[in-house]
Amino acid sequence: MTADLPAQHQEWPGSTAELNPPADHGEDSWTGRDRLVGKRALVTGGDSGIGRAVALAFAREGADVAFAHLPEEQADADRTCALVRGEGRRAAAFPGDLRTHAANAELAAAAVEALGGVDVLVCNAAFQMTHEAVEEFPPEQVERTFATNVFSPFWLIRELAQELERNRGSVIVTTSIQAYQPADHLLDYAATKAALNNLVVNLAQELGARGVRVNAVAPGPIWTPLIPSTMAPEKVEKFGADTPLGRPGQPIEVAAAYVFLASDEASYVSGTVIGVTGGKPVF
């Protein structure tokens, strides 16, 4: 994939089918090696983009997968379910908006019931919308960004902490390069990702004593429906061109980090952030 993308726009939250060029979620590129056999994972934002790639890679590695998605993303969610089931694994999709504690508590309980337990929690759902000046950021957008990106992971981890402790499980949170190199047109989004880095470090200290590992993955510019549905067409054209590798990443290129962190190979890895950024530093 090059950095020369066609200018394009989608209505939020965007559709995988309308991406030009198509995104790679690992359908033809990921080879499973039985690294997650017997594990049960809950992924938020699992319908498309990084979430879909994680769901598919986890399934190919032997895990059953439950995931959450917005009701508007049903078509993409159906496709993710089909991909997971095509690997012979259980799939359960839960539509809903995770901006309230109640919604996260319901999701946690539903995932445990559907899978018989949860060993891996991936807090990946996020909201962003770009603006050129601070005065243009609507108060309701800022509240939505923090509720989706920060409050939901906090509440979901809270609800599943005892379940993860019983299973000696792990938590993986999606942060971002924006936590380290914030862009002014993503003011609120960048702030939430910095908050998540802090949350991961703190939770690793508390939950580590209970046998639960907590880590994060910080993606750089990754080609997902979120990009054309939240950025101006002229920004989409050069998306990812400012990375040392000179291109945006594909969702499956990020999913590899989640597979590692969820696997027993990462049994001594906790409290860290793995950058998948095309060369941008995460420090």
Image (tube, helix red, strand yellow):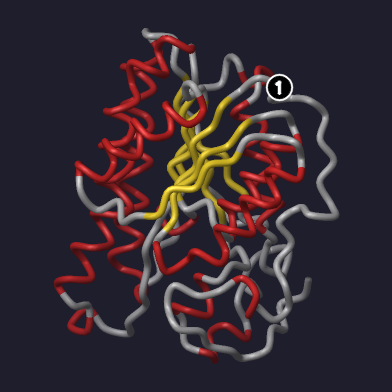
Q: Is residue 73 left or right of residue 205?
A: right
Residue 3 in percent (x, y) is at: 71, 77
| 235 in relation to 63, above or below | below
Q: Residue flagged by tag 1: what amino acid is it? A: Val
> Looking at the rendering, in which quadrant would you find the N terminus?
bottom right
Q: Quadrant of residue 274?
A: top right
Q: Provide residue 245's location: percent of width, then percent of height.
A: 73, 63
Q: Residue at x 56, y 51 (%)?
A: 51
Q: Position of residue 201 (x, y in %)?
A: 37, 29
- Residue at image point 46% right, 81% down: 231
> What residue sits right under mark 1 in the picture?
37
Indicate whether 242 appears above or below 212: below
**Displayed quadrant of residue 269:** top right
Q: Residue furthest left?
A: 139
Between 162 and 171, the one nearer to me in the picture: 162
Describe residue 127's horizontal placement relative to residue 100 as left or right. Answer: right
185 left or right, relative to 73: left
Image quadrant assignment for residue 40: top right
